[in-house]
Image: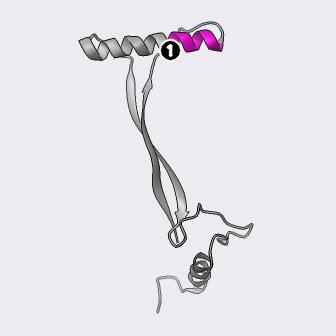
Amino acid sequence: MFKKILIDLHAEIELPRGWFRGSLERQAEELEYEARELTEFIRDHRSRDSYQISIVREYKTVCEFCGFDEERDGEGVPVCCGKAIEEYNMAKVEPVGGKG
């Protein structure tokens, strides 16, 4: 009744931050500098072994019937649409191993 769907995708580049000092604003300036350096690295292939690039997928769970985000009441019953409630109730009474 609910399914996980991909809602966003982006790449994250982890820049080395261990040596940054000072205020958060100063750290932001240092990261911006490192980002510019990484751009140059990509252009001229200098070694930057400490950089890591990750692809991040963001998901959410939605109702397969109405498309609304998954939401349940305090007892775990879906509250988005009648079809989801109906399927939930049917799954509760269905014997283990499927219909018999």
Amino acid type assigned to the residue bearing label 1 in the image: Leu
In the rendered image, is residue 45 in sight?
Answer: no
Q: Quadrant of residue 42?
A: top left
Q: Position of residue 39 (x, y in %)?
A: 35, 16
Label 1, secondary structure: give it.
helix
Point out the residue furthest to the right here.
74
Establish if 71 lies above or below 85: above
Give the quadrant of residue 72: bottom right
Q: Residue furthest left?
A: 44
Give the dominant element type of the magenta stretch: helix, strand or loop: helix
Q: Which residue is mark 1?
A: 31
Rendered image coloring scheme: one colour
Where 20 falls versus 58 (above or below)?
above
Q: Image check: 60 left or right of 79?
A: left
Horizontally, is 32 left or right of 54 in the view?
right
Which residue occupies 47% across, 16% down? 16
Work out whether 69 lies above or below 96.
above
For the point 39% across and 25% down, the residue is 52
Q: Residue at x 52, y 82 (%)?
A: 96
Coordinates of residue 53 in the picture (x, y in percent): 38, 28
Q: Position of residue 88 (x, y in %)?
A: 60, 78
Total number of numbered discs in the rendering: 1
Would residue 33 appear left or right of 82 to someone viewing this image? left
Q: Position of residue 2 (x, y in %)?
A: 53, 67
Q: Is residue 2 on the magenta stretch?
A: no
Label 1 crowd bin: few (<14), some (14–19), many (20+), radius 10 Å: some
Residue 58 visible within the image: yes
* Magenta segment boundaries in residue numbering: 24-31
Residue at the spot 58% in from the left edge and 84% down from the top edge: 90
